[in-house]
Amino acid sequence: MNVLLSFAAALLSLRLAGLLARSRHIAWAGGVLAFAAATGAMAWGAAHGWDSRAFRVWYLAGALLSAPLLGVGSLMLWGRRWAAPLGLLYAGLAIGLAAAMPVHGAFDSTHVPHAQDHVDTLPRVVAIAGSSLGTLAVLVVAVATLRRRPLGNALVVAAIAAAAAASALTQTAVAAAAACFALAAALLYAAVRT
């Protein structure tokens, strides 16, 4: 079930990323594409067992990129032009960090690995800061523009809540986490379509 739900979230996210790219919402498309890669890595890890390659993709896409790029996209939609170069700089930093970070420890199950068991402090601090600031940006913009787009913004906030729940559940209840990731992707898809 973990594999199917994670794979479904990846497919739905890919579809949404394509829609966003066509409508020139590039930062949001990048954030959703990162979400697709992260859930795809979860599906791979659940089906074949985790290894350092799947973990590195999951960590880069899910922990380092998805929420920050969604935050940058929200700020850009809100007319904050300074967000684009900042987002590009951060994405480069995150990709470099993920490529260079040593991944240590053994991977011996189909459950999502604990980051603290496999990466050093710096990548974890960057992931926490980037995800927190990206999530905060999405929420601030959604609340600030709620009157203009009440249903769409409510769906965005619900998607952020589902993704946060999924992130919290990855270490203890993988099936529930996969279901929450699929729900987050569906909610984002519905938000963009409204």
Image: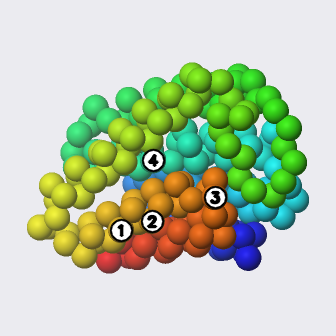
Outermost residue to the left? 147
Q: At numbered mark 3, what does the secondary structure look like: helix, strand or loop? A: loop
Q: Which mark is residue 158?
A: 1
Q: Tell me which amino acid carries mark 3.
A: Thr
- The Cα atoms of the two marked residues, 2 and 4, are separated by 13 Å
The answer to whether the residues at label 3 and label 4 have Cβ atoms under 8 Å apart is no
User: Image point 31% across, 45% down: which residue?
Assistant: 136
Q: At numbered mark 2, what does the secondary structure look like: helix, strand or loop? A: helix
Give the residue at mark 4: 67
Q: Tell me which amino acid carries mark 1.
A: Ala
Q: At numbered mark 1, what does the secondary structure look like: helix, strand or loop? A: helix
User: Image point 35% across, 38% down: which residue?
Assistant: 133
Give the residue at mark 2: 162
Give the image quarter of residue 169.
bottom right
- The Cα atoms of the two marked residues, 1 and 3, are separated by 22 Å
Q: Is residue 12 above or below residue 137?
A: below
